[in-house]
Image: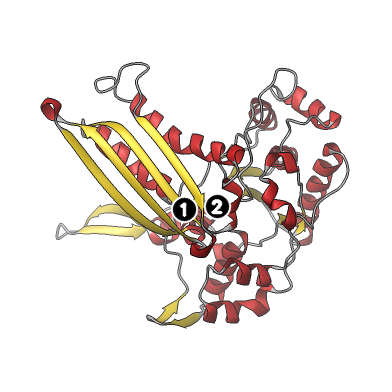
Amino acid sequence: NGCTCVAGAIANRLGLTWNTKEGEQKANYWGSLMMASTVKLGNDVRGDAVYTPIKNMLPMIDPSQVVWGGWDINKMNLGDAMKRAKVLDYDLQRQLYPHMKDIVPLPSVYFADFIAANQSDRADNVLCGTKQEQMEQIRKDISDFKAKHHLDKVILLWTANTERFACVEEGVNDTAENLLHSIQRDENEVSASTIFAVASILEGCTFINGSPQNTFVPGVVDLARQEKVFIAGDDFKSGQTKMKSVLVDFLVSAGIKPVSIVSYNHLGNNDGKNLSAPSQFRSKEISKSNVVDDMVASNRILFEEDEHPDHIVVIKHVPYVGDSKRAMDEYTSEIFMGGKNTIVMHNTCEDSLLATPLIYDL
């Protein structure tokens, strides 16, 4: 998502066009709530509805004006990373490459226990030292970046690998004080994303989590409150999970009772490769389940206190399909007078091209 995000902002800033087999394409921000959707203001004198872009309602910065920087455990420059990802059309890549080939990510935090073992071959750009030393380096990187570019505000957003869930333990990460002491002691249950979150909070910068792991352990939430810094996020939910959120909301709100939800998807990008490991998959499974649990809890007419639909999630890594994720869902529901209703959905979605506009919004 990182190289796609930067590429999209550059393409829009330069107003690039490129050719595909379908014809000429032009840079846009479709998929961004702020940049590409509208809100109704009311009606004009003839009674016709009047709409305006959401960006006109709020003092938002155009993404093409943002100064971008970041970290990665892989030192490949963003131009070559864009080629490796195979997300954007070739003609667009060709035009963007000169603008991206000199952008190299800063060394990042790498705790092998938290992500899949199959990521080790990418880890050639990592920080050394204790967790405290690495956290201090991230703080320095933030401070230096802000000073170098004369910025008013810096926002950190985690769009890296999904981590396994960290164990929440008393005396380790249950309070801000315990968490800071745990970092100093090099405790095992402090994840890389939590290191970034703590560094961001201590630098007074908003931190957004775009992956489904539990970055925001109680100690992080406590620290953010103490420092009066915003934190937000629990997975982007841009593809299958977004559709699940919408459809389950529709069914339950319509008084229809979902009793079985079976979701299968396969993808070939590095996210899919990382999620092929059981611990990382479990984080994603919990995230997908949460959107169902929230709706079930909203309607006690349909569901008893401890009643939940059967809910199965399967994710497979299929390298050939690349960033073009395939998602297949079956929703079985109980309807009026003991009847049954089944909805089957197939969704092919470009993973990074759905997630990147959300990064701009956030």
Dividing the picture into quadrants, the one containing residue 263 is top left
- Indicate left or right for 258 with 237 as reference: left
Please tell me which residue lies in front, 232 or 336.
336
Q: Amino acid at mark 2?
A: Gly
Please tell me which residue lies in front, 147 or 30.
30
Asked if the residue under mark 1 is in contact with the one under mark 2, i.e. CB atoms within 8 Å, the reply is yes
Residue 207 pos. (x, y %):
63, 43
How many marks can you see? 2
| Position of the N terminus by quadrant | bottom right
Sequence order check, earlier mark of 2 and 1? 1
Dividing the picture into quadrants, the one containing residue 44 is bottom left
The residue beneath circle 2 is: 272
The residue beneath circle 1 is: 266
Figure check: 352 above or below 177: below
Residue drawn where x is 25% and y is 23% of the image: 302
Residue 99 appearing in the image: yes
Residue drawn where x is 45% and y is 33% of the image: 290
Give the SS element for disc 1.
strand
- Indicate left or right for 211 with 21 as reference: right
Mark 2 to mark 1: distance in Å?
7 Å
| Label 2 crowd bin: few (<14), some (14–19), many (20+), radius 10 Å | many
Residue drawn where x is 80% and y is 41% of the image: 135
